[in-house]
Image: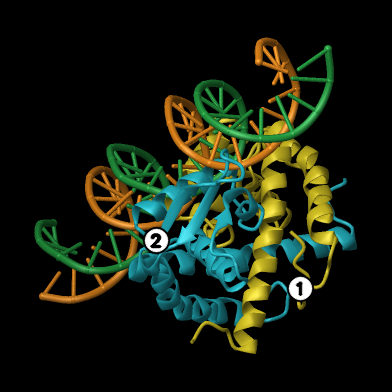
Chain colours: A cyan, B yellow, C green, D orange
Amino acid sequence: MAELDSPAEAGLVAQWRELLARHASASCMLDRELGERYGLGMSEFEVLERLVEACQGGGDAVRVNELAPTVHLSQSALSRLIARLEKAGLVVRAMCESDRRGVQLTLTEAGRDRYVQARPLHREVLALTLGDGIDPARGASSD
Amino acid sequence: MAELDSPAEAGLVAQWRELLARHASASCMLDRELGERYGLGMSEFEVLERLVEACQGGGDAVRVNELAPTVHLSQSALSRLIARLEKAGLVVRAMCESDRRGVQLTLTEAGRDRYVQARPLHREVLALTLGDGIDPARGASSD
DNA sequence: GGACAGTACATGCACGTGCATTCAATGCAA
DNA sequence: TTGCATTGAATGCACGTGCATGTACTGTCC
């Protein structure tokens, strides 16, 4: 027969579906809301956030290759995303002095402002989509 | 300053990043592995699985509009996904008798076989990507 | 009966993504 | 120094997705 999962597998599948449901609802709502009100996609916001965090950490410029592993995007997707942010005037690309293959990113005033404005909405969406039905073990699956 | 999250918000963000990381690693690996070895995307597999489950439940045909809420896709994406599955000979589209607007999906032999073949790999990938670091409550945040 | 809103699905279109490739710069070895 | 593999990033291309729209059918109200 081989049609049935073992209990362990069934648990994994339930966990996976729960994760899929949460990811779908959260990312969908984030994209819609951030896009409508601030012209930002979910990943755009994520990148701005990493830049802000890096600035708080002291440095004011971030290497793209350091940013890559933290956002879950391919190198090409990240490259184009940064191009969009730059075109929108939210970041500035500059050649890295120490390694001229690299690119340093700097958050502009507009970029920081946009992030600060968008952040409350971002947190609100997370609270809405992650906060309700907190019980990863069950397949609550509203959707 | 308004630069800092409240503890509750920080927790949400940590939870969100954990979710993003798991989703990225799992879906990426699923797409790559299922695609390479069985010519299926993650969502294709998910749809086949729902069809198999429906067949086990008794009926042998599923309405598309019943399938829609369970997979997290737009109606148009689901329509095209089904078209791909049909072109691959894994499902058959038939007009629904009771409501001729609707479409009934039937799993073909090939479709069921493909699912049965792909399922172990699917479970294996889930075990690899969801199994390590099991503790959704904490922001373990490797990556 | 006919008109009209609502539903189920398909399709045109724009866009973001990943893969493969390309180009520039670096590091290392001869 | 020259030559070559490697790394960082940009780009061509194919493809999957969502939004808006179109088409076919249903149900209701007149």
Asked if disc 1 and disc 2 are in contact, CB closer than 8 Å, the reply is no
- Tell me if A77 is positioned left or right of B137 in this view: left
Residue depicted at x 76% and y 78%: B137
Which amino acid lies under the numbered mark 1 shown in the image of this protein? Answer: Pro
Q: Residue at x 67, y 58 (%)?
A: B23
Q: Residue at x 45, y 64 (%)?
A: A31
Q: Which mark is residue B136?
A: 1
Circle 1 chain:
B
Asked whether, in this view, residue A3 is left or right of residue C4, the answer is: right
- Residue A125: percent from left, percent from top: 50, 77
In this rendering, the count of numbered labels is 2
Label 1 sits on a secondary structure element that is: loop
The dot on residue A90 is 2
Q: Residue A98 sits in which quadrant?
A: top right
Neighbourhood count class around disc 1 (C-alpha, 10 Å): few under 14, some 14–19, many 20 upward: some
The amino acid at mark 2 is Leu
Residue B109 visible in rendering: no
Nearer-the-camera pick, A44 or A99: A99
Q: Nearer the viewer, residue C22 or A33?
A: C22
Q: Are marks 1 and 2 on the same chain?
A: no
Q: Position of residue D10 (x, y in %)?
A: 46, 37
Up-down relation of residue B21 to residue D23 (above or below): below
Residue A84 lies, with reference to residue A35, above or below; the image says above
On the image, the x and y values in percent for residue B106 come to 60, 43
- Look at the image and tell me whether residue B79 can be seen: yes
**Residue A121 quadrant:** bottom left
Q: CA distance from mark 1 to mark 2?
A: 33 Å
Rendered residue at 35%/52% (across/down)? A87
